[in-house]
Amino acid sequence: MENKNFCLFCGSSSLTILFDKTREKTNSKISRCVNCDIVFIWPQSDKDLDLKEYYQDSPSLSNYNEKRFLKRLNRVKIFKNFPSFLRKLFLRRIVFPEGKQKVLDIGCGPGMYLALLKEAGWQVQGLEINAKEVEHGRSFGLDIFHGKLEEANFPSDYFDYIRIVQVIEHLSSPSRIFEEMERVLKPGGIIYLETPNVNSWAFGYFKENWLSVGGHIFGFSNDSLGFLCERYGLRLKRIKSRAAKGVIQDALKYALRDKSLFLKLVTKNKAINFFVVRVMRLFLALIGKGDSLIAFIEKDS
Ligand SMILES: [Zn+2]
């Protein structure tokens, strides 16, 4: 694969090269487009570009916590028949938003989130590229399509809600999936999207070591997601960032190399670690520099 001197997404030739190496010490460059603000890692190997090949035979990729899942499922079972305001209060963080509609989870893994929604009364459909995850999910009685969205041929204006978490950064063409999501989403429907945030403190801190070249092709910001939505007639309704505990802890461990006494205290002492990580998570989310972007995207009715 040769180097490209134009943006893989919008075609602009105004690029800033952020890093001329990657974590894996390949000769790929990490560039940022001046026009649409998308970040991309290029060149990529043919294998990494072919999602099916990349994920086909890999073992289960999900890191879902079974204990936490069962706790949540139990909570849904208890509160699902409660009056609406109580249901909202107790289930808001688990099965957003109010249900009994059609939902599609793209890259659903073994379908744990769908299982919660199904229990709450939603009509659920999953889509997953990893065969082992599909098998796992189907064993729970979930309807999971094995393949890419553009191969599933869902009807137009069909889903009320699409969930796509940590997926678009791995695709060789985010345009194609946006076009297809717009088609299968009902007018007034919502896309819930999560993806790494290239304006994050973590990217600034870890630099070229933040995103691995294998599998990660794109990185997004508020601006590039807005650009993508606008191109496909979707509206970026709300966007925020979230900082994961693990990323901050990793950063602190990494910083230990500096051998500062303060950092040693932070990483070794559990109470101080808890406090520092908590404060950093809140602060980074507040200033939009958390490592993940969470976007609510709407199709106009
Ligand atoms: Zn661009």
Image (cartoon, rainbow, N blue to C red):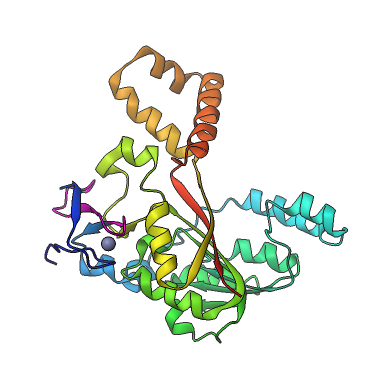
| Residue 91, horizontal then vertical, whole percent | 74, 53
Quarter assignment of residue 58: bottom left
| Residue 98, horizontal then vertical, whole percent | 73, 63
Q: Is residue 45 above or below residue 254?
A: below
- Main SS type for the magenta part? loop
| Residue 234, horizontal then vertical, whole percent | 49, 69
Magenta stretch contains residue 36 = yes
Residue, far top: 261
| Residue 144, horizontal then vertical, whole percent | 56, 76
| Residue at 32% across, 38% down | 204
Q: Specify the quadrant that holds the N terminus.
A: bottom left
Magenta region:
21-39
Drawn side of residue 301 relative to residue 70, left or right: left
Q: Is residue 201 above or below residue 255?
A: below
Drawn side of residue 5 relative to residue 235, left or right: left
Q: Specify the quadrant that holds the C terminus.
A: bottom right
Quarter assignment of residue 40: bottom left
Whether residue 147 is visible here, answered yes or no, is no
Magenta stretch contains residue 163 = no
Work out whether residue 286 or residue 165 is closer to the camera in this orientation and state it. 286
Ligand 1 image position (quadrant): bottom left
| Residue at 49% across, 57% down | 62
